[in-house]
Image (tube, rainbow, N blue to C red):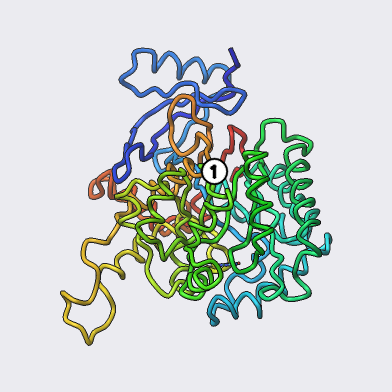
Amino acid sequence: MSEIKFAVLGQFFHCPIKGDFEYAKKALIQVDNNGTIVSVMTEADVEFQTQVSFFSSKSKLIELSSSQYLMPGMVDLHVHAPQFPQAGKGLDLPLYDWLQDYTFPLEAKFADMDFTKQIYPSLVKSLLANGTTSAVYFATIHKDSSVELARECLKQGQRGYVGKVNMDEASQCPPFYIEHSTADALKDTELFIQEVIGLEGNQHQLVSPVLTPRFVPSCTSEMLQGLGELAQKYQCHVQTHCSESDWARDYSQQMYGKTDAEIYRDFGLMTNRTILAHSIFLTAADHAIIKETGASIAHCPLSNMYFANAAMQTREILDNDLKCGLGSDLAGAPIPSIFHTCLDAVNHSRVREDGTSTYLAADTRGESGSRISFLESYWMATVGGGKAIDAKVGLFQVGFEFDALVVDTAVSDSNIFIIDEMDSDKDKLEKIITLNNRQNICKVWVKGQLVVNK
Ligand SMILES: Nc1nc2[nH]cnc2c(=O)[nH]1
């Protein structure tokens, strides 16, 4: 039996059931040397006090204060790592022009390892400080630079899913940012998979490789075919963009006469480890394909407001029990925080429900019944994300990995203001979801390893 590394004593929130939450006022969570939760006790357990005293006497007890809340780590299902320097600017163009004018020139710079090493450490640090314990990254087309991102995740202790981007369609990619050849790119991708799996210190697979066809327009059918074969061979994760905008949806129809989900399925890219970013223009048949294959959706609400030309079917996706989590889509949206994304997801659904045009009567303006709740968005950010990456994270339950953070509502520069006599447990959780900032996050653990400690 593995040894207990530490035990945390304090209050916690988590969401075992979509749309609901659990609050434990005083709990003791024991974590073993592998970073796995081996016991979750509350005061109702007869052994509770004895265990608390035991871990205290061994100096293995981490006791939270009354203003501190233990929460599951956040899962960001869609981050463009090389776009970090672009965050907060350049969102004035539609998707196609934004890629060509701003994004591809920036991503091309990651051929330079010095530039890579200047950017990626700050990005990983920033995400961890915002409570993102697991991140699913698009890197760039450059193998060595992409491996460096995986190495950086490992170094800072973040659960990282990293993809070397593939793009080889000459009509859609600029000459300065395109694979040398499809065959070379596929070889590089296979090497990338092997190098990431074999990284020094990655025995527990904290970082994993992800096959990453950028999206249908940037890939030839040979590339999609080759990546589909690698997905079957290595059983690794796959990530891509799916039906993100009118333009992207129409491109697929013109080229293949199919939707993105149908194209990915037909090339063997839809598996229960596939993450489809955006997924705005889904048909009923797409829903069926996604459900049948067990693929997941990364909902990126803020970026959708810039690029999607439409609102996400979040309500239907949740009601249809499709696997769905949240993505920041840095830097199609500027904010590196999945707490913020929770708020965006709710806002996005409310705008959809209400509609926008003041020239229309209220009852014809929006799509009634399409809102989602704060608890549903938080569920997506934790449990939904965990299911998408196929990791046991997002809940404080025995057998789950201890990926967690401590939110302190009493830090001097806090936006969260809790009054115990006035705020119910649900009020407190909603306040934390909506008002939490990185200054409130004082501790972060990934797989039982303390990676942020303020
Ligand atoms: N939001 C977003 N959509 C894309 N579609 C293809 N590439 C991208 C990208 O970098 N960001």
Q: Position of residue 87 (x, y in %)?
A: 60, 69
Q: Is 51 located above or below residue 115 in the figure? A: above
- Residue at screen point 57% across, 57% down: 240
Q: Which quadrant would residue 28 be assigned to in this image?
A: top left
Please name whichever residue, 286 or 116, is drawn nearer the observer in this view of the structure.
286
Please name whichever residue, 369 or 241, is drawn nearer the observer in this view of the structure.
241
Number of numbered discs = 1
**Location of mark 1 (residue):** 273
Q: Is residue 442 left or right of residue 68?
A: right
Q: Is residue 287 left or right of residue 72?
A: left
Q: Is residue 409 visible?
A: no
Q: Residue furthest bottom?
A: 359
The secondary element bearing badge 1 is classed as: loop
How crowded pointer 1 is (Cα within 10 Å; few <14, some 14-19, many 20+) is rated as many
Q: Position of residue 272 (x, y in %)?
A: 51, 42
- Residue at screen point 39% across, 35% down: 11
Q: Is 143 located above or below residue 357 in the figure? A: above
User: Which amino acid type corresponds to the residue marked 1 in the rendered image?
Assistant: Arg
Q: Is residue 85 left or right of residue 292?
A: right
Q: Is residue 141 visible?
A: yes
Ligand 1 sits in which quadrant?
bottom right
Q: Which quadrant would residue 301 be assigned to in this image?
A: bottom left
Please name whichever residue, 229 or 177, is drawn nearer the observer in this view of the structure.
229
Q: Is residue 444 left or right of residue 374?
A: right
Q: Position of residue 92 (x, y in %)?
A: 54, 82
Please name whichever residue, 296 or 352, is drawn nearer the observer in this view of the structure.
296
The quadrant the N terminus occupies is top right
